[in-house]
Image (cartoon, rainbow, N blue to C red):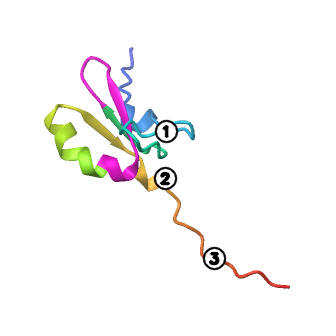
Amino acid sequence: MSTTVTTDIRDLWLPKAADRCDTTGCGARAYVLALFRGGSELLFCAHDGRKNKAALEKAGATIVDKTDLIEPPKPHQPETD
C-alpha cells in the first residue's frame, strides 16, 4: 500500500527575520511570498503585499500571506521610579 503526501507551500513557508521586501527602497520584513510558475519568487512586506496582490494574482502568482504572524505593538508602559 502506498501513501501519497501532498504538501502545500502555503503550509511550509515561514518568513525568517532576514527575509526583506523586494519592493525597491522598502526593505521592511517580508510576510508575503509570491510564487510564480517556473520557480521565481518575490517577497513583500504586509503593506506592499496588499498593494500588489491583485496584480500578482493576475500574473499567475500563488500568494502565501503570513501577515497573521505580525505581533501587535505592545502598549507603552511608563517608567516608574
> Label 1, label 2: how many angstroms apart (C-alpha)?
9 Å
Report which residue position mark 3 lands on.
76
Answer few, some or many: residues within 10 Å of disc 1's Cα (few below 14, many 20 plus, some between 14 and 19): some
Asked if the residue at tag 1 contacts the one at tag 3, i.e. Cβ–Cβ closer than 8 Å, the answer is: no
- The answer to if 7 sits in the magenta stretch is no
| Vertical placement of residue 69 versus 21, above or below | below
Q: Position of residue 21 (x, y in %)?
A: 42, 40
Q: Position of residue 20 (x, y in %)?
A: 47, 38
Report which residue position mark 2 lands on.
69
Q: Which quadrant of the rendered structure holds the C terminus?
A: bottom right
Q: Is residue 66 left or right of residue 81?
A: left
Looking at numbered disc 2 in the image, what kind of residue is underneath it? Leu
Q: Residue at x 24, y 45 (%)?
A: 52
**Which of the two discs, 3 and 2, sits closer to the camera?**
3
Report which residue position mark 1 lands on.
14
Extreme residue toward the right, this view: 81
Extreme residue toward the bottom, this view: 81
Which region of the structure is painted magenta?
35-49
Which numbered disc, 1 or 2, marks the residue that appears first in the sequence? 1
Q: Which quadrant of the rendered structure holds the N terminus?
A: top left
Q: Is residue 63 left or right of residue 70?
A: left
- The answer to if 37 sits in the magenta stretch is yes
Say which mark, if any, is on residue 81: none
Depth check, front residue: 40 or 2: 40
